[in-house]
Image (cartoon, helix red, strand yellow):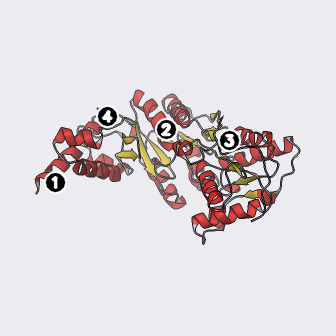
Amino acid sequence: MSENKLLYEKIISYLRQEIHSQNFKPGDKLPTEKELAQKFGVSRITSKRALEDLKSEGLIYRVRGSGSFVSSLEKNLDKFLSTSTTNNRLDYSRVVPIVLPFDVSNGGIMNVVIGASRVMDEKGYILSIHCCNDDINEEKKLLLHLYEKNVAGIIHYPISDRKNLEVMNLLYLNNYPIVTIDKYYESIPISYVVSDNLRGSYEAVQYLISKGHKKIAFVSDGKIEDATSIRNRYFGYCKALNENKISIDEQLVKSGIIDLNSNQDGIEMYKNLVKELVNQNVTGICAINDYVASSLMKSATELGISVPNELSVIGFDNLEFGKYLSVPLTTVQQNFYKIGKVAAQMLLEGIEGGEHKCFKSVVPTKLIERDSCSKALTIQNI
């Protein structure tokens, strides 16, 4: 075995032990590649490989431009427990999983995890992170697996609030401590923490209307019927139009665009959508999130449509990349950290109090003005 291999494994062993012993706690930033290289006398390539391996295990998450952070446990809870030493072996009753539809490095979810993990850490619980890769069947299996393992409780970010209802009913009827974030189940009285999606979208559309826009489109990658978060943003859009006596034109409401156009290349799909909306004299677009907003802006630019002079676009989430786009994105900010913190507090109250009431928390949003919106102009059909 080469010396580099031994040093590489030494770095992994060191970081794994520091995390398991909680010298590095959930949400803590780890030493950089350079710092680890200096500490162990190796190249940065070696230290980077060690961090990448820990990331693939799910023990850490790496955020481009920010560094590496502790995620508490591997994505697979059983794997973590089996690799822990006997003395450090975890008690399932002190583990609280957070079940996510996508990787924690996606969007603002890292801040949800940090908010939740700090609350759990203060109370002596361990937050484990699990991703079901936007797969409904995987989500079902994971929820049932965690329930059968008798973990303390679950924070759940559902893929859809219309799917896996039988699992959620099972947890509810067995008085199992669970809190959902981002979405809530309208037919099952389970506690939840969500952003004020209706108000946030309403203020976004009001902002466009204040700049003279009357032909305003609503664009969502997901279907309106699949999520309370999307529905409430759509309702906020409608509310603002109604209050300003602007008729709701369903031709300007584009939802489920990924499903409807799955046979198209992503950027071509958005370009065709922008063409269609512009040809209907749309001057403003309220996008379901910052990713959709940025794709619309990129497509408009490639079509020779100026943002914001000819087409105004507003997003939702206030993700970090939005401020660095060629035209900084006007958006609605979600307080992801507070969502995670409140969800953890809510869950622990049920776990430690032994009574799992249905608590509801709606976290305020905030409009962030940048450069992607301006006064309405009419452009020629293309």
Amino acid type shown at disc 3: Asn
The residue pinned by badge 1 equals 5
The dot on residue 197 is: 3
Q: Earlier in the sequence, mark 1 or mark 2?
A: 1
The x, y position of residue 18, in whole percent, is: 26, 37
For label 1, the SS is: helix
The x, y position of residue 358, in whole percent, is: 63, 36
Q: What is the crowding at mark 2: few (fewer than 14 residues within 10 Å), some, or many (at least 20)?
A: many
Amino acid type shown at disc 2: Asn
Residue 153 in view in this figure: no
For label 4, the SS is: loop
Q: Earlier in the sequence, mark 1 or mark 3?
A: 1
The residue pinned by badge 2 equals 111
Q: Earlier in the sequence, mark 3 or mark 2?
A: 2
- Asked whether, in this view, residue 109 is left or right of residue 256, the answer is left
Task: Report how far apart the C-alphas of labels 1 and 4 lie in the structure.
Answer: 24 Å
